[in-house]
């Protein structure tokens, strides 16, 4: 079977111990060296073939990006920025090397996510790298999979479809809606597994109960697209269905997936993943909550470098008990895009980060927005270095300069602020 990324050296056969290939169990130092080498190649490729990166990274020498610290010198591209850039330069904002016409690598399909943001799909097998996550969820060659992700406009249906076909599964393209027809197809075709949102799987099962239809062949599921509460996982397990999560996006493909250990999500072998301070590109300390930033290492059609997902997560220490040795993250912990409007003006996490940068005595900051006597109030809570003399008036002046709003300042000792990834905490309540 072909490897999941299409990269040289990734064509190992599945190992007999339940792992997709030997990449999943390699020494972490070997993985880091291999991924950094692939990263340098990908940066050079993006500079040469994706016009936006050719301009934005014109002063970057890819050979000097030899560590994660060096990678942090490259600016993060965030989804909100991507939308603006695509609107100015359709269809892909200069981020893609693929397209249509003789001047481009040939895109097999093109999709639209809300915005709209357009995404190309190249011709490489398992383009979105979902086969690895599907294998971890128990899908195998010869299975029939009922795919209830949308095949219309957005790439979700194709993401799972291409991964399943890479595993040599047969796919029923159920799509979304038409619940009674979904139940009928499942009853008559007897699929081994389901892929789709967890809530739609529950809707289908409830409808089957209502209709008096049994679906005993359904034993496995890979779910994504929304939260997957432990109570729902337990309810599915009680019905004989083992369901696992995958964290994926239309821009990046598979990022991390759940294994039989069920201890966090294991980062996909085809991406280099970072957790950074929201509003900046600076890595957080191990275990702290921050924004998920990812670089697919082998996608020559859409070579995104340091793409900020806007999702919050944190790294889990150690390796998974299932034997996979890659980094693990806690899963989705909220959104990093915490911009809020105060007295008619938007305040962004990047502005809070700028305040911290201008005042070296600040270790960490959180802007809390509340209401007092019906009026909006901003209070900048900051942790200060031991013994540091922080000029409060200067900090408040910087706050006013950057946000155009007055605010108050509250000082804290190191460690007093919660490490939950929040840079702006809007706690206003409206009666």
Image (cartoon, grey):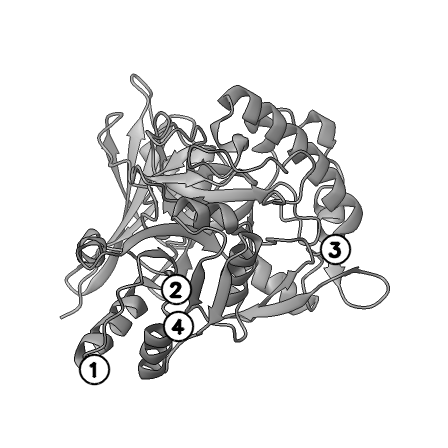
Q: Secondary structure at mark 1?
A: helix
Disc number lying in front (4 or 3): 4
User: Could you tell me if the residues under marks 3 and 2 are in contact, i.e. CB atoms within 8 Å?
Assistant: no
Residue 107, quarter of the rendered image? bottom right
Is residue 230 positioned above or below 381 on the image? below
Near-viewer residue (213 or 89):
213
Query: Which residue carries the number 3 mark?
Result: 97
Q: Earlier in the sequence, mark 1 or mark 3?
A: 3
Inter-mark Cα distance, 1 to 4: 17 Å
Identify the residue at horizontal 44%, vertical 74% (top origin).
175
Chain-order first, disc 2 or disc 4: 4
| Left or right, 234 with reference to 118 | left
Q: Which residue is mark 2?
A: 196
Q: Which mark is residue 211?
A: 1
Q: Nearer the viewer, mark 1 or mark 3?
A: 1
Check disc 1: other Cα within 10 Å, few if <14, some if 14-19, many if 20+: few
Q: Earlier in the sequence, mark 2 or mark 1?
A: 2
Residue at position x 23%, y 30% from top?
412
Mark sitting on residue 189: 4
Q: Earlier in the sequence, mark 1 or mark 4?
A: 4
The one of 254 and 278 positioned closer to us in this rendering: 254
Spatial CA distance of label 2 from label 1 is 21 Å
Q: Nearer the viewer, mark 3 or mark 2?
A: 2
C-alpha span from label 1 to label 3:
50 Å
* Percent x, y of residue 6: 66, 45
Q: Earlier in the sequence, mark 4 or mark 3?
A: 3
* Number of numbered markers: 4
Location of the N terminus by quadrant is: top right
**Residue 110 or residue 371, whichever sits in front:** 110
Tag 2's secondary structure? strand
Q: Residue at x 40, y 51 (%)?
A: 246
Find residue 394 and report its horizontal and vertical position in percent. 39, 36
């Amino acid at each position: 079977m072909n490897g999941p990324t299409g990269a040289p050296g990734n064509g190992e056969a599945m190992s007999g111990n339940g792992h997709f290939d030997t990449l999943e169990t390699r020494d972490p130092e070997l993985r880091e060296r291999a991924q950094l080498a692939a990263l340098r190649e990908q940066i050079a490729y993006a500079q040469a073939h994706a016009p936006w990166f050719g301009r934005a990274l014109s002063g970057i020498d890819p050979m000097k990006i030899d560590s994660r610290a060096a990678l942090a010198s490259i600016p993060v591209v965030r989804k909100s920025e991507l939308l603006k850039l695509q609107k100015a330069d359709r269809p892909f904002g200069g981020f893609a090397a693929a397209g249509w016409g003789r001047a481009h690598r040939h895109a097999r399909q093109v999709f639209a996510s809300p915005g709209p943001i357009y995404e190309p799909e190249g011709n490489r097998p398992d383009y979105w790298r979902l086969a690895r996550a599907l294998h971890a969820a128990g899908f195998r060659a010869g299975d029939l999979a009922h795919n209830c992700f949308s095949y219309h406009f957005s790439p979700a249906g194709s993401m799972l479809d291409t991964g399943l076909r890479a595993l040599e599964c047969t796919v029923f393209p159920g799509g979304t809606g038409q619940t009674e027809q979904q139940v009928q197809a499942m009853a008559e075709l007897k699929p081994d597994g389901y892929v789709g949102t967890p809530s739609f799987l529950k809707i289908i099962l409830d409808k089957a109960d209502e209709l008096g239809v049994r679906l005993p062949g359904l034993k496995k599921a890979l779910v994504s697209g929304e939260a997957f509460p432990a109570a729902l996982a337990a309810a599915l397990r009680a019905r004989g269905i083992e369901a696992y999560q995958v964290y994926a996006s239309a821009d990046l493909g598979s990022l991390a997936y759940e294994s039989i250990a069920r201890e966090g999500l294991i980062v996909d072998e085809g991406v280099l993943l970072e957790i950074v301070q929201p509003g900046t590109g600076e890595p957080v300390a191990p275990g702290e909550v921050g924004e998920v930033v990812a670089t697919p290492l082998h996608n020559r059609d859409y070579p995104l470098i340091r793409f900020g997902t806007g999702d919050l997560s944190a790294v889990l220490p150690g390796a998974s008990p299932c034997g996979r040795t890659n980094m693990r993250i806690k899963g989705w912990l909220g959104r990093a895009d915490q911009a809020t409007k105060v007295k008619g003006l938007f305040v962004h996490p990047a502005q809070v980060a700028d305040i911290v940068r201008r005042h070296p005595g600040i270790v960490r900051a959180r802007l809390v927005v509340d209401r007092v006597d019906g009026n909006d109030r901003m209070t900048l809570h900051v942790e200060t270095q031991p013994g540091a003399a922080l000029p409060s008036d200067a900090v408040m002046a910087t706050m006013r300069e950057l946000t155009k709003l007055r605010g108050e300042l509250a000082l804290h000792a190191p460690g007093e602020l919660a490490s939950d990834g929040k840079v702006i905490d809007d706690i206003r309540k409206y009666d």
